[in-house]
Image (tube, helix red, strand yellow):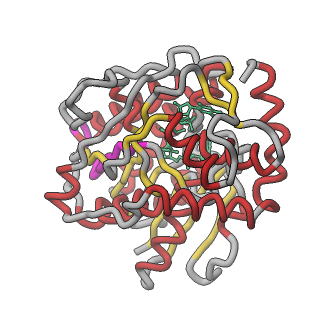
């Protein structure tokens, strides 16, 4: 199988590329990635050049996408602008890449009859109250809050319209918050770890009571592969690993694992429109496809992630100063 992976030089896309090449010895992968500030060739090092190729380009480039899709058996679409905070400073790249780029991919898979898996987020469902006993299901109405989540919601709607109107063969997954190695230092967990490694203080938005539902990126990759191979076209699968934790809990675990005092962090300005709680009900994925997460011990997964950042400073150092400079401008 020849798989085109968009956004394969990003955090989750690169994990998926390594995962698929390891788990499916017959697979070949072509990555299409623009290498924005979030893309990194170094995340794809060590792959067999006989089975792997990186094309540096934009998913909005129609002739390029057409050519690459025509040469593929399936497309797994990860490419996106992915950071909520950036979407609050400048939404325009989110509209272009996440909405227009997805439409370009849909038109190409339609022309060439190629199977698509579209990677999306639980944030399309908005947020839940802290004491709400329910979790997100595929029946939860869309209610996105930020320009990022609204652009991802738009892309999901486009995929469903192309399935229904044009018979495109596509699946969608909406996953909860990922953690693990190779995540950009703008995101919550790597930002705190690298701040502490730099002798800087950890930063908690607002009260820190906001809850995220954490899943290891390896588990996200295994779920996407299961859906790609065995999911039913037209279906949406929610991916989650029962990992609900408040930001304060996660931060205090990082502080403990890194040998710091539990109160050695500061509260900084809250994110405007900050979603309170995400929680995924992954029953369909478990029941229909028999998928199970492997990284069920969050403490252990977090400790391994901390070790990875300790041992791989060369990977994250080049992006750290520019990231913190952007946060300083908005008081975070
Ligand atoms: P990331 O920001 O780490 O990586 C995004 C990648 O897309 C980068 O390599 C970037 O260079 C590339 N890209 C951006 N614009 C492009 C364009 N116009 N053309 C080609 N390539 C482009 O993001 P991530 O965290 O790995 O997220 C990957 C996908 O998973 C996204 O679609 C995101 O919405 C979704 N998702 C992420 C999470 C999470 O916790 N990070 C959770 C659920 C869903
Ligand atoms: O320094 C920080 N301090 C802090 O308290 C940062 C960077 C974040 N936070 C909070 C905000 C969120 O409540 O931590 C939580 C997680 O923040 P992010 O890492 O920015 O993730 P989030 O906004 O939840 O979105 C993530 O999960 C869903 C991904 O970035 C999205 O791409 C995905 O769709």
Q: Is residue 44 above or below residue 131?
A: below
Instruction: Judge from the rendering whether residue 119 lies leftward or rightward of residue 331; answer left or right.
Output: left
Residue 313 position within the rendered picture, expressed as x and y whole percent measured from the top left: 79, 60
- In the picture, which quadrant includes the N terminus? bottom left
In the displayed orientation, state which residue is furthest to the left: 287
Answer whether residue 207 is visible to the viewer in this image.
yes
Residue at 37% of width from left, 47% of height from top?
243
View extreme (top): residue: 272
Is 184 one of the magenta-colored residues?
no
Residue at x-position 18% and y-position 32%:
139
Number of labels in the image equals: 0
Q: Position of residue 26 (x, y in %)?
A: 42, 84
Which part of the image, by quadrant, shows the C terminus? top right
User: In the image, is residue 137 above or below residue 47?
Assistant: above
Left or right: where 330 falls relative to 49? right
Q: Position of residue 318 (x, y in %)?
A: 84, 51
- Is 301 drawn above or below residue 64 in the view shown? below
Q: Residue 186: percent from the left, percent from the top?
A: 68, 39
Q: Which residue is rendered at x = 53% and y = 27% of the image?
A: 208
Q: Residue drawn 45% across and 23% down? A: 275
Quadrant of the rendered image holding ligand 1: top right
Can the viewer see residue 75 in this picture? no
Q: Which residues are magenta?
A: 164-176
| Residue situated in front as seen by the camera: 306 or 110 | 306
251 sits left or right of 238 in the view? right
């Amino acid at each position: 199988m020849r798989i085109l992976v968009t956004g394969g030089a990003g955090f989750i896309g690169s994990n998926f590329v390594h995962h698929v090449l390891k788990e499916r010895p017959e697979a070949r992968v072509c990555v299409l990635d623009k290498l924005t500030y979030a893309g990194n060739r170094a995340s794809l090092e060590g792959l067999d050049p006989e089975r792997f190729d990186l094309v540096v380009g934009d998913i909005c480039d129609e002739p390029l996408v057409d050519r690459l899709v025509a040469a593929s058996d399936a497309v797994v679409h990860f490419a996106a602008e992915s950071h909520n905070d950036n979407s609050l400073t400048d939404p325009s790249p989110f509209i272009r890449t996440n909405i227009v780029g997805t439409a370009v991919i849909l038109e190409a898979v339609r022309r060439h009859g190629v199977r698509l898996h579209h990677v999306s987020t639980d944030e399309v469902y908005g947020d839940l109250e802290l004491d709400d006993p329910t979790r997100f299901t595929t029946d939860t109405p869309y209610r996105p809050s930020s320009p990022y989540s609204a652009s991802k919601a738009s892309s999901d709607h486009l995929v469903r319209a192309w399935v229904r109107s044009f018979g495109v063969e596509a699946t969608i997954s909406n996953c909860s918050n990922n953690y693990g190695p190779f995540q950009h230092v703008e995101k919550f967990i790597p930002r705190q770890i690298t701040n502490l490694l730099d002798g800087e203080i950890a930063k908690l938005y607002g009260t820190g009571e906001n809850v995220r539902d954490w899943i290891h990126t390896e588990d996200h990759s295994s779920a996407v592969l299961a859906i790609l191979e065995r999911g039913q076209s037209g279906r949406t699968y929610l991916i989650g690993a029962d990992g609900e934790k408040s930001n304060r809990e996660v931060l205090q675990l990082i502080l403990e694992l890194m040998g710091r005092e539990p109160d050695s962090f500061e509260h900084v300005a809250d994110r405007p429109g900050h979603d309170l709680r995400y929680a995924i009900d992954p029953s369909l994925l478990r029941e229909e496809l028999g998928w199970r997460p492997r990284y069920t011990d969050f403490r252990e997964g977090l400790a391994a992630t901390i070790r990875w950042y300790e041992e791989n400073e060369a990977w994250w150092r080049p992006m750290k100063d520019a990231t913190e400079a952007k946060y300083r401008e908005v008081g975070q």
